[in-house]
Image (cartoon, rainbow, N blue to C red):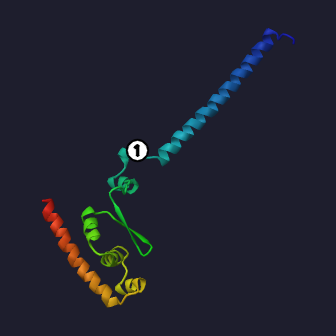
Amino acid sequence: MEKLSSQDELTVMHQFDRLCQLALDGEAADYFRHLEYRANYEVNFSDMTEQELDSIFVMDEYNLDNSHFQVLGYDIEVKDTLLVEALQALTEKKRNVVLLSYFLEMTDVEIARKMNLVHSTIREHRIRSLELLKKLMEENMDGAE
């Protein structure tokens, strides 16, 4: 390998220096373009309105305290522990009627078809179940005080 003259070395150094300047100018342009993009499309949380914050707010719910009831192939989740206790005190038919009626919003006729009963029987079960639920929940509320 032949040795470069001092003039050639100086030329190579200037070429390398220019190449570094161009690379830094390109990086600076990319950086400023990125800052402009962020200024146009990103917002600080402190600059957002309460309504905007509420729209992106998410609350994780863990159903550790929730109870599930299996009714005619449906999985029904009940979150209120007082209601769960009262429902568990009902007979299975009455509990099923209440769960299908109020949690799955089925009509008496639909429930009657699913359970192979007359719809007037379903109506009676629902009315008596509600009376029992009210009584049981009132007793549990009085006992908790």
Place of residue 20 in the rendered image (x, y in percent of width and height, measured from the top left):
67, 25
Q: Secondary structure at mark 1?
A: loop
Q: Is residue 89 left or right of residue 111?
A: left
Q: Residue 77: x and y, percent?
A: 36, 66
* 14 relative to 69, above or below: above
Along the line of sight, the residue nearer the viewer: 95 or 25: 95
> Which one is nearer the viewer's eye here, 121 or 62?
121
Label 1: few (<14), some (14–19) or many (≥20) C-alpha neighbours in 10 Å: few
How far across and down, in percent of the image, does residue 42 sit?
A: 46, 46
**Residue depicted at 38% across the width and 53% down the height:** 60
Q: Is residue 133 above or below residue 80?
A: below
Left or right, 19 with respect to 63, comes to right
The quarter holding residue 91 reads bottom left
Question: Which residue occupies the extreme right position in the image?
Answer: 1
Label 1 amino acid? Asn
Name the residue nearer the viewer: 111 or 55.
111
Q: Give above or below for 99 relative to 78.
A: below
| Residue matched to label 1 | 44
| Image quadrant in which the N terminus is located | top right
Query: Does residue 106 lie above or below 65 as drawn?
Result: below
Residue at 21 percent of width and 76 percent of height = 132
Give coordinates of residue 133: x percent, y percent. 23, 73
Front residue of 116/18: it is: 116
Locate residue 65: give its quadrant: bottom left
- The residue at the point 35 percent across, 55 percent down is 64
